[in-house]
Image (cartoon, rainbow, N blue to C red):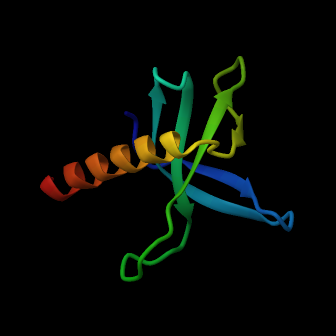
């Protein structure tokens, strides 16, 4: 699992570009996909942030990739489990 300060630009349904901070990324052997969890930059630590998740495929250079929606309930369950593990580890530090 990778995490660190990295930003991505996400385009919403209305075509607006939103700068987001990557919370962490991980790969799933089960679904044979990579996933990214992220939230809009500028959301305060005081307020509850909305964390978004997408699957993605990196291009050959390992740089930008295309974000894709999560397709199944099983994927959402796995992502939620990974997020809970990540948050538990953050609290321990």
Picture coordinates of residue 1, whole percent (x, y) = 37, 33
Figure label count = 0
Nearer-the-camera pick, 42 or 92: 92
Q: Residue at x 53, y 26 (%)?
A: 31
Taking the view exactly as shown, the residue that stands out farthest to the front is 73
Nearer-the-camera pick, 6 or 78: 78
Picture coordinates of residue 77, whole percent (x, y) = 43, 46
Q: Quadrant of residue 55?
A: top right
Picture coordinates of residue 47, whole percent (x, y) = 41, 82
Taking the view exactly as shown, the residue that stands out farthest to the top is 60
Picture coordinates of residue 74, whole percent (x, y) = 49, 40
Q: Residue at x 21, y 49 (%)?
A: 89
Taking the view exactly as shown, the residue that stands out farthest to the left is 92
Q: Residue at x 46, y 72 (%)?
A: 49
Seen in the picture, residue 15 relative to 25 is either above or below; the reply is below
Seen in the picture, residue 16 relative to 57 is either above or below; the reply is below
- Left or right: residue 48 versus residue 40 is left
């Amino acid at each position: 699992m990778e995490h660190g300060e990295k930003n991505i630009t996400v385009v919403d349904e209305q075509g607006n570009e939103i700068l987001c901070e990557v919370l962490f990324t991980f790969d799933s052997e089960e679904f044979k996909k990579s996933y990214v969890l992220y939230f809009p930059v500028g959301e305060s630590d005081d307020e509850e942030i909305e964390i978004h998740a997408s699957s993605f495929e990196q291009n050959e250079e390992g740089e930008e990739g295309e974000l894709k929606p999560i397709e199944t309930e099983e994927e959402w369950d796995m992502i939620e489990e990974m997020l809970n593990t990540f948050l538990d580890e953050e609290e321990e530090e």
